[in-house]
Amino acid sequence: MHPNPAASAQGGADRLLRQVIAAMIQHRPFAHCLCPGPSFSGWTSDLVCTILASIPRFFFLSHRSVGRHPFSSRHRSPLRQRFLRHESRPVGPAAHRDHSIVLLGVSKALEFYSWVQLPTSSGFSHDESTCREMARVLAKSNILPPLWRFLRSNKQLVTIATVTSIIKVLGEHGLAKEALAAFYRMKQLHCKPDSQ
């Protein structure tokens, strides 16, 4: 019986994802610890997006996040029921994050995004989907200066869908002013707002 090539490729992608996340958590350089298997045909947009999308789960959750308590039924109030104007510090799980771990996640995400396009790591060319996923990671960190710098330096890949996705993430995190600022930055990024 011949092995299923699709299952083999998926297994290789899962193994590579675990290697990348382990390198990030252990704060190791990617070039020395990533060992793609013989079936690895190179980086794809889907694989890069999958790795980027997994970063918030490992670096941005607090120990008090819903689902992290094994025997708790306590849930966070929806944003519409809270008085965000009267709350001066981060609220919900974001208030209980370890800031140094969030900064490490942001740093390693940006490092991976840059490393994957180097000729030594196969010279992958980023596209709109990988740019959008990286921007979503930065927005989920709630540390916005790196997000604005990233968008400016990748202007050619930023689309309306990217900015809309960022606005949605910021809104979900209760950052209404920042979401509005992202809307107004569309013009600087040469995007025109639409009605979607």
Image (spheres, rainbow, N blue to C red):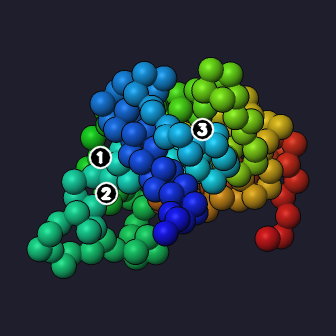
For disc 3, the marked residue is 147
In the displayed structure, does residue 155 sit left or right of residue 26? right
Query: Do the CB atoms of the residues marked 2 and 1 lie less than 8 Å apart?
Result: yes
The earlier-in-sequence mark between 1 and 3 is: 1
- The amino acid at mark 3 is Leu
Say whether residue 170 is left or right of residue 91: right
Image x and y of residue 15, in percent:
42, 48
Quadrant that contains the C terminus: bottom right
Residue at 45% of width from left, 33% of height from top? 35
Could you say which disc has been placed on residue 93 in the image? 2
Residue 59 visible, this orientation: yes
Is residue 163 visible to the viewer in this orientation of the structure? no
Residue 21 is tagged as none
For the residues marked 2 and 3, what is the alpha-carbon distance in whole angstroms?
Answer: 20 Å
Instruction: Name the residue tied to disc 1.
Output: 97
Which tag, 2 or 3, sits closer to the chain's start? 2
Give left or right: position of 54 versus 46.
left
Q: Residue at x 66, y 29 (%)?
A: 122
Query: Residue 77 vs residue 182: left or right?
Result: left
Q: Nearer the viewer, residue 119 or 154?
A: 119
x, y (%) of residue 175? 52, 55
